[in-house]
């Protein structure tokens, strides 16, 4: 597999859609259940039972930034895109085999050893 040579649609199909039904643990320990992934959004339920949808386009924007920079700190994404979706976006992208999720600070890194 040529990892980071995958375009985002391939990443979505091969690595994110299969997360349906899984509980994702966020960097700070919170949990979100992935209940649906379509070609337009990812639907999650928080540990408090609140459902929300995150547009696929938001994941794509973060993925493009990550591919270009090879490392992203969550705080920079909060500043750039706003909202409170960065923790789930980072946790989901951290499930992609060639992307590592680190804590303190919460960071995504392209793992060239797995690409």
Image (tube, helix red, strand yellow):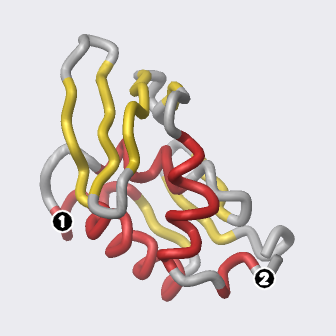
Dot 2 crowding, Cα within 10 Å, few <14, some 14–19, many 20+: few
On screen, 98 above or below 88? below
Most extreme residue toward the top, as rendered?
48
Residue at (36% x, 54% y) in the render: 38
Residue at (71% x, 65% y) in the render: 98
Residue at (59% x, 46% y) in the render: 18
Q: Are marks 2 and 1 in contact (CB under 8 Å)?
A: no
On screen, 5 above or below 42? below
Q: Position of residue 68 (x, y in %)?
A: 49, 88
Which mark, by number, is residue 29?
A: none
- Do we see residue 107 in this rendering? yes
Dot 1 crowding, Cα within 10 Å, few <14, some 14–19, many 20+: few
Quarter holding the N terminus?
Answer: bottom right
Image quarter of residue 77: bottom left
Q: How many marks?
A: 2
Residue tagged by mark 1? Answer: 81
Image quarter of residue 84: top left
Q: Position of residue 63 (x, y in %)?
A: 45, 72
Frontmost residue, 79 versus 95: 95
Residue tagged by mark 2? Answer: 2
Q: CA distance from mark 2 to mark 1?
A: 28 Å
Of the two numbered discs 2 and 1 in the rendering, the one whose residue sits closer to the viewer? 2
Q: Position of residue 49 (x, y in %)?
A: 24, 13
Residue at (20% x, 70% y) in the render: 80
- Do we see residue 105 in this rendering? no
Most extreme residue toward the front, as rendered?
38
Frontmost residue, 19 versus 114: 19
Q: Position of residue 66 (x, y in %)?
A: 49, 75
């Amino acid at each position: 597999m040529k990892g980071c040579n995958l375009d985002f649609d391939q990443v979505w199909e091969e690595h994110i859609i299969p997360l349906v039904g899984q509980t994702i643990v966020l960097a700070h320990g919170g949990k979100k259940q992935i209940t649906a992934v379509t070609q337009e959004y990812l639907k999650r339920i928080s540990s408090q039972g609140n459902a929300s949808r995150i547009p696929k386009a938001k994941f794509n924007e973060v993925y493009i930034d990550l591919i270009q920079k090879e490392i992203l700190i969550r705080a920079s994404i909060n500043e750039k895109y706003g909202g409170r979706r960065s923790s789930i976006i980072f946790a989901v992208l951290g499930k992609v085999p060639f992307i590592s999720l680190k804590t303190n600070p919460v960071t995504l890194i392209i793992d060239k050893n797995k690409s």
